[in-house]
Every structure is written in structure tokens, then in C-alpha cells.
């Protein structure tokens, strides 16, 4: 087992680290205040090739892979989780096409996504179905050479700034996820350009954290797309959605990992300066234990996240590998919440104030245990694998 990153991975990590320090960090608090999508940071990522890491070379990306993306996301998340989400969306929005799309669809959308010429979004969640995505209610009806799509999606990251969305809709009755193993479900995936007639964004949400990336409500009303925009076969959409989420889970974990690292590093700097009872905070054992607990969690999370991303790069993201990807996501995102909370505690009242970034990290961390499958749903995946004997310790 080789625990060293390759030179190529180190180069991507170092590039992302430099961009994070020089370009992202100075913008982080402002994005949180204004809620304006940072086109400048998106542009910087595009220029550095960070939006095409998971897109194959033949379609304009670098094909560097998911470990490379996780490394970049980790660096950026040390300072700004909205910006880290922008990087993650570069994969979440293109993976349905990458995994299930035709050569023509890939040639049309992937090179422009890698270059930052277009942005995409991933539209699965609906008002009545979040965790139970297979019960989604949006419908796509075949009409000659087109599909007419009707439906409402909620909480769509980047939905209001996207040029296209990957939209999941029912093309048949019955269990959406039924026959996932052979791809014969009732749900299909579509590429819907946001300029299509019938596509609208009625509103964006007011929310707790990750304010720099809008979370949009999206409505399709008799929205027509060519049948050629269907991703894969009719009925393969649910499988495409689940595989997309599986591949991205370690990257969500990387958002948590980087956040934890940034939060505790900030608290340590503070604890070196601040004196109580005649000595620096770092000399109090209770503070040392919070620092050490954070380091223990961070080192464990890093191994889980890198291993998960490595599995994805090996093509191991199908159902049988899902528990490892869920473990990486759950551990790292829950760690982020614990460490952000402890970091505030180390600063005391100052940690609660907007003069420091920790209250922002704390609010941002909360999102991570909900998105792309809640912590509870990850635990279902893990427990089911244990019960079936697929994740065995005996
Ligand atoms: C900021 C933000 C951005 C998002 N971005 C996107 C996006 O880009 N695209 C997209 O499609 N979606 C997005 N989502 C939606 C997100 O994926 C869903 O919120 C998530 O899947 C949970 O669905 P829900 O909110 O409907 O909760 P529900 O499914 O209603 O669940 C409510 C609670 O019950 C628990 N629960 C549900 N079922 C079970 C069960 N069987 N066993 C135990 N516990 C259970 C859940 O864990 C949760 O705690 C985003 C959400 C947020 C907050």
C-alpha cells in the first residue's frame, strides 16, 4: 500500500493551496455577507484547470480524477466552503453525462464545462422526495422527437446560475429505483438547457450557510427537450443519479475535511496568543485535548476521504463499494461539525463573532450532513452492507 501522493496529485494540491490562499481566502467573508455567486473565483478555477479534473482528457478535461478533486476541494474548504462547493459542482453536474451520456452529449457539454464556459446543476430533490429519491414525481412524456417535462425541484445548488441541469424525471410508473441493478427503473435523466422554454427559477432560498452558492427552486412546465438529450436508456436515470452521488461522496467528505483543518488551524493560532490565568491558552490541558482530538479526527478523515476518492478513480463506485464512500462522507462531515464547534469554544466569545471565520465555518459545516444523502441515509447504506455480509469484520 502506497501512502504517498503522486507528483501529479501534489502539483494539483499545491496549485489549489496557492489559489485558496491568494484568491479564495480574501473573498470568503464577503461572499458570506453578499450571497453573490463569485464568478471571479469560478474563473480562477477554470483558468487553473480545476473544473475539469474529473472530465476525461478526450472531452477537454485533465482526467486527473476524484482524488485530485478531493485534494483541491480540501485546500479551498480550509477557507471557504462556498468556493469548495463550486469545485464539487464541477463533478456533480457533469458526472451524469460522464457516466451515462452518449459521445455526442459528452462532446457538447463536457469540454465547455471543463473550460468554465458553462455551469451545470444536479436536479434530483423535490418538495415531496429528498432521501426517498426513487419516489420522485417529475414526469417526462415522449412526444415525437421531444420529451415534455413537468416537475419541481428544490434546494438545487447553483441552479439559478446554471446553463444546463441534469434533471431526473419519471418516464414510467412503478418504483423509480426498481431494477437499479439492471438499469430498468422508471426514472430517466435529461440534459435540460436552462434557456429552454418552460424552464424557470421562481426563487432562491434564504439559508444558514454556504451562502456564496445559491440554492434554487426550479420548475419545468411543459419544458421541451429533444429526445437526444436523454442521458442513457429510458429507465436508467435512477442508477445514473445514484452512481453520480457515490462518486461525489468522498468529495463532500473533502469539504468537511478541509473545513475542519481550516477551523482548528485558526483556533490554534489564536490559542497561542490569548492568555488566561497568566499563561497562553495552548498551555491549558483542556485546550490541548480539543486540539489533539481535532488532529486525531482530521488524520482519520483524510485517510477515509483519500481512500474513497482512490476507489472512485479505480472505477469502484458501484453499490458494493458504496459503504466505503458513505463512511468517508459521514465521518468527515460529522467531524467538521465537531471541530468547527470546538474551534469556536477555543476562542470563547470571540469565536461567536463575525470578526472571525469560525461562526461561518460552523454554519457551513451544518449543510454537509444533509446534502447528497443525509448522515442517516449513509448509515442505512453502511448497515445494510453489514447485514448482508458485504462489509464483514469476522
Ligand atoms: C444547501 C443545500 C443544497 C442542496 N443541493 C442539492 C442539489 O444540488 N441537488 C439536489 O438534488 N438536492 C440538493 N439538496 C437536497 C438534499 O440532497 C436533500 O435535502 C437531502 O437528500 C435530504 O432530503 P430532505 O431534505 O427532503 O429530507 P427528508 O428525506 O425529508 O428527511 C428528513 C429527515 O429524516 C431522515 N430520514 C429520512 N428517511 C429516513 C430513513 N429511511 N431512515 C432514517 N432517517 C431517515 C433524514 O436523514 C432527515 O434527517 C440540497 C440541500 C441543501 C440543504
Image (spheres, rainbow, N blue to C red):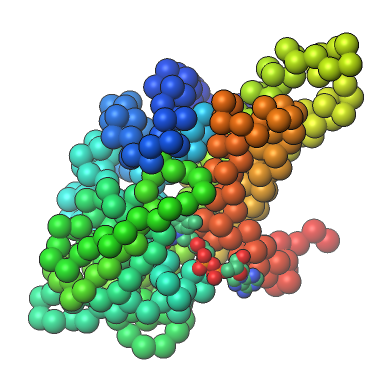
Q: Quadrant of the C terminus?
A: bottom right
Q: Nearer the viewer, residue 161 or 105?
A: 161
Could you tell me which residue is drawn at 56 percent across and 49 percent down?
Answer: 368
Percent from the top left, x then y, of residue 291? 77, 28
Residue 288, picture quadrant: top right
* Image vertical order of residue 337 relative to residue 96, above or below: above
Q: Residue furthest bottom?
A: 173
Could you tell me which residue is drawn at 13 percent across and 74 percent down?
Answer: 146
Residue 164 relative to residue 187: left or right: left
> Residue 292: in sight, yes or no?
no
Q: Residue furthest left?
A: 144
Percent from the top left, x then y, of residue 178? 46, 81
* Image vertical order of residue 244 relative to residue 131, above or below: above
Q: Quadrant of the N terminus?
A: top right
Percent from the top left, x then y, of residue 199? 20, 65
Residue 347 relative to residue 288: left or right: left
Q: Nearer the viewer, residue 218 or 245?
A: 218
Percent from the top left, x then y, of residue 180? 46, 75
* Image vertical order of residue 98 relative to residue 5, above or below: below
Amino acid at each position: 500500500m502506497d501512502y504517498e501522493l503522486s507528483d501529479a496529485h501534489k502539483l494539483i494540491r499545491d496549485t489549489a493551496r496557492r489559489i485558496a490562499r491568494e484568491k479564495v481566502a480574501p473573498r470568503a467573508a464577503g461572499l458570506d455577507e453578499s450571497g453573490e455567486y463569485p464568478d471571479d473565483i469560478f474563473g480562477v478555477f477554470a483558468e487553473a484547470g480545476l473544473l475539469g479534473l474529473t472530465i476525461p482528457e478526450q472531452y477537454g478535461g485533465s482526467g486527473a480524477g476524484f482524488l485530485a478533486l478531493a485534494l483541491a476541494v480540501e485546500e479551498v474548504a480550509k477557507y471557504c466552503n462556498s468556493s469548495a462547493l463550486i469545485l464539487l459542482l464541477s463533478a456533480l453536474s457533469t458526472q451524469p453525462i460522464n457516466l451515462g451520456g452518449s459521445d455526442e452529449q459528452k462532446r457538447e457539454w463536457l469540454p465547455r464545462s471543463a473550460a468554465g464556459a458553462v455551469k451545470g446543476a444536479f436536479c434530483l430533490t423535490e418538495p415531496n422526495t429528498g432521501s426517498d429519491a426513487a419516489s420522485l414525481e417529475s414526469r417526462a412524456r415522449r412526444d415525437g422527437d421531444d420529451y415534455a417535462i413537468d416537475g419541481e425541484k428544490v434546494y438545487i445548488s447553483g441552479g439559478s446560475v446554471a446553463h444546463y441541469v441534469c434533471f431526473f424525471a419519471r418516464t414510467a410508473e412503478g418504483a423509480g429505483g426498481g431494477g437499479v441493478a439492471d438499469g430498468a427503473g422508471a426514472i430517466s435523466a435529461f440534459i435540460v438547457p436552462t434557456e429552454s422554454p418552460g424552464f424557470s427559477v421562481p426563487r432562491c432560498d434564504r439559508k444558514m450557510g454556504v451562502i456564496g452558492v445559491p440554492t434554487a427552486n426550479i420548475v419545468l412546465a411543459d419544458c421541451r427537450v429533444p429526445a437526444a438529450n436523454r442521458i442513457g436508456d429510458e429507465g436508467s436515470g435512477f442508477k445514473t443519479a445514484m452512481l453520480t452521488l457515490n462518486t461525489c461522496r468522498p468529495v463532500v467528505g473533502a469539504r468537511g475535511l478541509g473545513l475542519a483543518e481550516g477551523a482548528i488551524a485558526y483556533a490554534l493560532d489564536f490559542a497561542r496568543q490569548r492568555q488566561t490565568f497568566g499563561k497562553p491558552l495552548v498551555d491549558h490541558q483542556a485546550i490541548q485535548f480539543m486540539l489533539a482530538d481535532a488532529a486525531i479526527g482530521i488524520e482519520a478523515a483524510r485517510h477515509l476521504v483519500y481512500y474513497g476518492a482512490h476507489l472512485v478513480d479505480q472505477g469502484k463506485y458501484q453499490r458494493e463499494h458504496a459503504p466505503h464512500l458513505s463512511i468517508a462522507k459521514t465521518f468527515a462531515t460529522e467531524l467538521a461539525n465537531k471541530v468547527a464547534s470546538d474551534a469556536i469554544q477555543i476562542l470563547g466569545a470571540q469565536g461567536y463573532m463575525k470578526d472571525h471565520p469560525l461562526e461561518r465555518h460552523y454554519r457551513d459545516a451544518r449543510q454537509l450532513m444533509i446534502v447528497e444523502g443525509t448522515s442517516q441515509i449513509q448509515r442505512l447504506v453502511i448497515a445494510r452492507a453489514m447485514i448482508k455480509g458485504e462489509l464483514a469484520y469476522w
